[in-house]
Amino acid sequence: MLGGESRDAAGTSTATSPLSSASPGRRIAAVDALRGFALFGILVVNVTYYASGYRMAGLAAPWFTSMLDWEVRGVVAVLFENKFYLLFAFLFGYSFTLQIDSAERAGAAFVPRFLRRLAGLFLLGMAHAIFLFPGDILATYAMVGLVLLVLRRITPRTAMILAVALTVMLAVGTLLLAGLAMMGGGDASEMVSESAVQAAEADRALHGSAVMIINEHLHKLGRILVLRVFFQCPTVLAACLVGLAVGKKRLLTDLSGHLGTLRRLQWTGFTVGLAGAAVYAHATWSGGGSTYHMIGQSVNLVTAPLLAAAYAATLLRVLPAVPRLGGLLAPSGRMALTNYLAQSLICSLIFTGYGLSLVDMLSPLSVVSIGVALFAVQTVYSHLWLGRHRYGPVEWWLRWLTNGRRPARSPRGSRA
C-alpha cells in the first residue's frame, strides 16, 4: 500500500529473495517490487490527467488528433488505465495483515494504531486533492481502510467471495445505468459539446493563479464525489479484500509452491483481461456515446482485475530470474507514498500555473515520455535516499503518527 509496510513484522528491513520464505522481521522483496511497478503504472496514467483539462472531462484535446496521438491514448487505455491502482489496493489489503502482525509482535493495540494511520492518509489525501490532484487515491484508501478494520476477522474464502460479489454487482449496476441511458435517449453531441466547454474552462483555470487552480480542484472534487463513493470505493475494497485473503494465507512470503497458480493467472489475465481492455479503450475514445461508454466501463470492471493479476503474476515469476529488476523497483516501492506525492508536485509544476503552465500544450507521446522520465529519476533518487535513511520522508512521518513514537532515521541494516 502507499506508505505501507511490506514486512512480516515490525523489525528490520533486510530484503529477501522474491520466492523464498521470509522470516519474521524481514521485508518481502516481492511486495516492494510490486509496489514500485504499480507506482510506475499509476504515473503513466495520472500524468495524462495533469497534462490536459480535456482528459479530466473524458475528452481528447482537439488539437492533438494525429494517428500517433490516438495510438498513444489507446496504448495507455488498454495497458495502464484502471489496472495499476488495483495493484496498489491489493497491496493495501495485503499490508493490512502485516500491520496486524506488527502490532501483535510489538504488544500494541492494533485498532487505535491503524486508525491513526488512516487519519494520516486521509489528511494527506485531502491536501493532495485540493492543492495538487483531485484524482487522489489516498483518501479513498483511508475510507476503505475503515471497512477492512470491521472485516479484519473474516476468513480468506469469505473475503474472496465478497470481492467477487462486489465486482459483479458493480458491473451489473453499470450495465443497468447504460440501459437507462439508452432508454432516456438524449443528444450525445450536445453532451460532448457541454463537456468540451467545461474542459476549456478547466484549461483556463489550470493556466491561472494558485487560487484559480485550487478552485478548479475543489470544483472537480464536488463533481466526482458521488463517483468516488459509489464506484471507486467498492472497486478498491474488492481489490483490498483479495489482498487481505492472500495476506492471511501468507502466500507472498513463499511463492515457490504456487507457480501453477501464477501461470493460470497469466493465461486468464492476458486473454480475458486484454480483450476487456480493448473494449474499454474503444468505448472511451470512439465517441460512441454515454451508453457505449458505460458498457465499456462495465466490461472493464470485470476484466481489469484479471489483467492486473496477470501483471503481478508475471512480475513475481520474472523476479527470481532477473533479480536486478527487483533491486531496481523495490526502493521506489518502499518510498511509494513519498514518490506518489512528489509525482503530483512535479507534474503540477510542469503543467499548471504553479510552474511552467504546459496544460494541453504537449502531445500525448511527450506527456507519457515525461512520466517515464520522472519515474526513472525517482528510481535513482529512491536508491540514493534509502542508502542513508531507513524510510522515505513521508513514510517516516506516517510511521511516527501510526506508532506514536519517533522512528529511527538510520539506513536499513543499521542497529540504530
Image: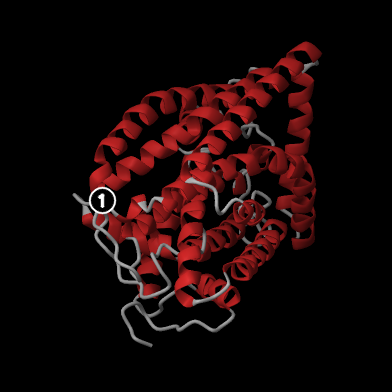
Secondary element at tag 1:
loop
Q: Nearer the viewer, residue 22 or 295?
A: 22
Q: Residue at x 56, y 62 (%)?
A: 341
Residue 129: image x %, image y %? 69, 56
Residue 233 in sight here? yes
Residue 305: image x %, image y %? 48, 35
Height in image: 318 above or below 97?
Answer: above
Q: Could you say which quadrant of the image residue 11 lies in? A: bottom left
Q: Could you say which quadrant of the image residue 98 lies in? A: bottom left
Residue 304: image x %, image y %? 49, 33
Q: Residue at x 22, y 56 (%)?
A: 323
Residue 306: image x %, image y %? 44, 33
Q: Nearer the viewer, residue 121 or 199?
A: 121
Q: Nearer the viewer, residue 330 or 371?
A: 330
Horizontal placement of 167 versus 378: left or right? Answer: right
For disc 1, the marked residue is 319
Residue 367 in sight here? no
Horizontal placement of 76 versus 251: left or right? Answer: right
Q: Please name the colour scheme applied to the rendered image.
A: secondary structure
Say which quadrant the C terminus sits in.
bottom left
Q: Nearer the viewer, residue 30 or 365?
A: 30
Q: Residue at x 64, y 70 (%)?
A: 112
Task: Single out the residue that lies furthest toward the bottom.
Answer: 416
User: How many marks are shown on the rendered structure?
Assistant: 1
Q: Residue at x 31, y 41 (%)?
A: 314
Amino acid type at circle 1 is: Leu
Height in image: 246 above or below 354?
Answer: above
Task: Single out the residue that lies furthest toward the left.
Answer: 321
Height in image: 276 above or below 404?
Answer: above
